[in-house]
Image: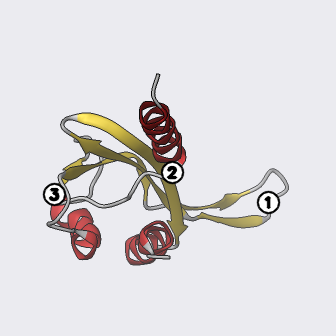
Amino acid sequence: MSNKLIRGLIILILSGIVTSCSKPVLMYNSVLVKIPENISIRKEELRSLFNKYINAKTVSALEVIVYSYSTGYESLGYSDNNKFYHNFRKGQIALMLKFKRANKIQNVIYIKASGKNKAEIFNNINKELEKIFKTP
């Protein structure tokens, strides 16, 4: 084998190793939102959180799946010894983000956020998204 061929093979192998070890780019040009029927969020509400991260130069797509959502609950009552009690549990949202290229999954990220009401839950999930999509 010639030296040029050997050098070419080494460069090809090393570039493959570097490429496979690098972190997948979190960019996309379209957003598909999937919400189960029993969850009371409109797709437009959720999609609006992702619009600022769209990059038309990429060929990737983002699929957002809501797999858990609760606005929280409040309970009032009396205990066995006739003491009044009041419990409050924060609401939460849990999302799965699938980054796809050519209809193949490139990366999957799970995120969660909680809050006292829907506005606070959305504000907190937006903070989580900012952490994910911030540019270095």
The percent coordinates of residue 15 (x first, y second) are 46, 44
Residue named by callout 2: 22
* Residue at (79, 60) in percent of width and height: 82
* Residue at (21, 68) in percent of width and height: 55
The percent coordinates of residue 57 (x first, y second) are 16, 65
Q: In screen coordinates, is 25 left or right of 64? A: right
Residue type at the position of mark 2: Ser
The percent coordinates of residue 93 (x first, y second) are 45, 57
* Residue at (36, 41) in percent of width and height: 106
- Packing grade of label 1 (10 A; few <14, some 14-19, many >=20) is few
User: In front here: 76 or 46?
Assistant: 46
Q: Nearer the viewer, mark 1 or mark 2?
A: 2
**Residue 35 sits above or below residue 133 on the image:** above
Residue 82 numbered mark, or none: 1
* Residue at (49, 69) in percent of width and height: 128
Residue type at the position of mark 3: Ser
Mark 1 vs mark 2, CA separation in Å: 61 Å
The percent coordinates of residue 12 (x first, y second) are 43, 38
User: Do labels 3 and 2 touch, CB within 8 Å?
Assistant: no
The single residue placed furthest to the right in the displayed view is 81
